[in-house]
């Protein structure tokens, strides 16, 4: 899906250029505008992928820090028990 919008944008660019050369200026403008929309959809898809990867890595880091925090709490509790038993 990521490359689909990019391919559509490039195809629209070539079609618009061909229409412009054949003096179909209005049609070339419409096709070029559709190409710009396809390009923006490509950028949107790319940013979503980057955002999802960032969120996944952030969640992984939070999970790892939670595990470390739980382990540290357990060690701290064991140390308190040892001190209390003295």
Image (cartoon, rainbow, N blue to C red):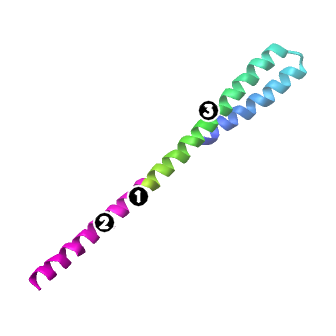
Comparing labels 1 and 2, the label whose residue is closer to the camera: 2
Return the residue nearer the eye: 85 or 35.
85
Regarding mark 2 in the picture, which secondary structure is present there? helix
Which residue: 15% across, 81% down? Answer: 83
Identify the residue under disc 2. Answer: 69
For marks 2 and 3, give the CA distance.
41 Å
Magenta stretch: includes residue 74:
yes
Image: 57 above or below 36: below
Residue pushed farthest left? 85
Residue 65 coordinates in the image, percent (x, y) = 36, 63
Residue 62 coordinates in the image, percent (x, y) = 38, 57
Return the residue nearer the eye: 82 or 52.
82
- Per the rendering, the mark at residue 60 is 1
Label located before the other in sequence (1 or 3) = 3
Which residue: 11% across, 86% down? Answer: 86
In the image, is 82 to the left or to the right of 59? left
Res 21 seen here:
yes
Label located before the other in sequence (2 or 3) = 3
Magenta stretch: includes residue 24:
no
Which residue: 50% across, 51% down? Answer: 54
Q: Which residues are magenta?
A: 59-86
Comparing labels 1 and 3, the label whose residue is closer to the camera: 1
Say whether marks 2 and 3 touch (CB < 8 Å): no
In the image, is 48 to the left or to the right of 67? right
Dot 3 crowding, Cα within 10 Å, few <14, some 14–19, many 20+: some
Image: 86 above or below 14: below
Image: 1 above or below 61: above
Identify the residue under disc 3. Answer: 41
Return the residue nearer the eye: 85 or 34.
85
The dominant secondary structure in magenta is helix
Dot 1 crowding, Cα within 10 Å, few <14, some 14–19, many 20+: few
Return the residue nearer the eye: 41 or 82.
82
């Amino acid at each position: 899906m990521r490359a689909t919008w990019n391919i559509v944008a490039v195809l629209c660019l070539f079609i618009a250029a061909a229409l412009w050369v054949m003096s179909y200026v209005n049609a070339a403008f419409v096709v070029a505008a559709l190409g710009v929309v396809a390009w923006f959809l490509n950028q949107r898809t790319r940013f979503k992928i980057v955002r999802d990867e960032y969120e996944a890595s952030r969640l992984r880091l939070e999970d790892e820090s939670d595990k470390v925090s739980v382990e540290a709490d357990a060690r701290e509790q064991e140390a308190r028990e040892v001190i209390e038993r003295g």
